[in-house]
Image (tube, rainbow, N blue to C red):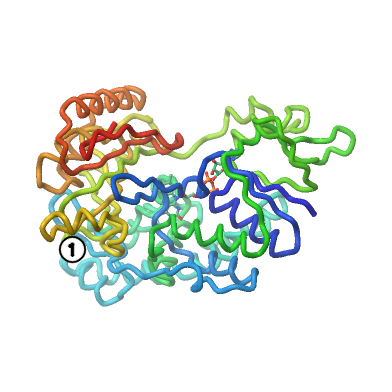
Amino acid sequence: MRCVVIGSGFGGLAAAIRLQASGHQVTIVEKLDKAGGRAYVFQQDGFTFDAGPTIITAPWVFDELFTVSGKRREDYVQFVPLDPFYNIRFEDGTVFHYNGDDENQISQVRAFSNGRDVDGYRRLLNSTRPIYDVGMALLDKPFLTLWSFLKVIPDLVRLRADRSVAAHVNRFLTDDRLRRAFSFHPLLVGGNPFNTSSVYTLIHRLEREWGVLFCMGGTGALVRGLLQLFEDIGGKVRLSSEVAEIEVDRATKTTTGVRLVSGERIAADLVVCNGDVAEAYRRLVPAWARPSTTDARIKRYTYSMSLFVIYFGTDKVYPDTAHHEIILGKGYKELLEDVFDKKILSDDFSLYLHRPTATDPSLAYRTWAAASIGKSWGSATAIGSCSISRIATCRGCSRTSSPSVASIRATSSRRSTATMAARSARSRRLCSRRTCGRTIAARISPTCTSAVPARTRGRGCLA
Ligand SMILES: Cc1cc2nc3c(=O)[nH]c(=O)nc-3n(C[C@H](O)[C@H](O)[C@H](O)COP(=O)(O)OP(=O)(O)OC[C@H]3O[C@@H](n4cnc5c(N)ncnc54)[C@H](O)[C@@H]3O)c2cc1C
């Protein structure tokens, strides 16, 4: 069959590789100039920034794509385990070094809770085993019919899937910091720990089973590896080619291919669309061909939270900053209520800081490092659920304090996302006027939109 796959994010790449490996002729059609989708890569001033995903917790998902293609993943990309998985930093200055080592975990739980939660932690860990077994078995099952869902209800009832992750964890632990450390995981997939089903505690188990891995060269290297694999087995890729319509034959109600924005037609017997589902239905599929998925229905969908990401490089290495840092604010439930229920930017927010150069220094500019009297360079991504505009001002580059915590935290009051975005833009203008000409390269983008083009001001701050 001739197949077109719309989108070259991980979903599109995976579908395309599987189809091509099964003997079909597949063309990936991607509107951006590079593959990767949310795993797009920005390169600037010698720094490489992975735009979105950075944490690999299910390596076998990638390995399978190589295996079904008759190749070995190790010949294309290298995964390395991280230790710690994350440092979790609390407002009171304490740090939980989270990893897969039982002894380490237990000694930290002991220290955090004065011994009170050690037994509870062991029971919590045991409780995630059956959840993991059932949850993983369901992970790749589509619930397309009522019956397919009814069949799993007994398991879900037995595992108390009606309880939230936070409720599940709180039954075992008493220390507030430990409760957060072992319940934040749904946030990684856009869920609120206070109302996401306890099935998602399987993420904790998943990390312990497989570790937290990083792809050398960054997530972009993984995208390039998958793209290379796809081409090696005969697939074709069309970049900078936006699909305007998925054509549907009225008589047979099957697709005949896609029409690009340029007007070109690509005929296909099968079209896989892996763009955002709401946008894809609304913009690409003619309304008559989707009688039950109307625009009105799509409007009523509930979307998961968004976040702001900034990318910056530094002229200094921060050896005490781990590859992954989770920097928690004072409130937890209150923050989650602001994000998920009230949908406002909180005064008190939490951050995820990614420092890939902790594992792979090649992601920062070596020439500069050589030229700067032995200094080596770091690059990092910080992600917060609120605006982090001030980090893009000269503040970050005029001071030597960690750009991660102090300056990112400095911002935010109760404002709507739009107001904060406008404020962020103002800060960036201010920053441009006060270009320091020194070391920080920063880029801000709300990740729900695609790349925000950056205007370079020498080596100073960017807007
Ligand atoms: C900031 C951030 C951090 C994340 N961190 C992690 C992490 O650490 N680990 C993890 O596992 N997951 C993480 N995720 C989630 C992960 O990135 C996504 O689940 C995954 O990348 C989605 O891939 P996808 O292929 O489904 O969609 P996308 O990556 O969104 O790809 C869709 C593609 O379709 C293209 N497209 C859309 N419409 C058209 C059209 N009309 N014509 C042509 N092309 C079109 C788009 O340009 C895009 O390239 C993170 C997400 C974000 C935003």
* Residue 174 shows in this picture: no
Which sits in the foreground, 123 or 25? 25
Q: Position of residue 106 (x, y in %)?
A: 25, 72
In the rendered image, is residue 415 in sight? Answer: yes
327 relative to 209 in the view: left or right: left
Q: Where, by quadrant of the figure, is residue 292 drawn?
A: top right
Quick check: 148 above or below 123?
Answer: above
Q: Nearer the viewer, residue 288 or 183?
A: 288
307 or 194: nearer the viewer: 307
Residue 235: image x %, image y %? 66, 57
**x, y percentage for residue 34?**
50, 46
| Residue pointed to by mark 1 | 112
| Residue drawn at point x = 35 percent, y = 58 percent | 169
Amino acid residing under circle 1: Phe
Query: Going 70% across and 54% down the picture, which residue do you hit?
Result: 26
Q: Residue at x 59, y 41 (%)?
A: 275
Where does the C terminus fall, quadrant-wise? top left
Number of disc labels: 1
In the rendered image, residue 252, in percent from the top left (x then y), is placed at 88, 39
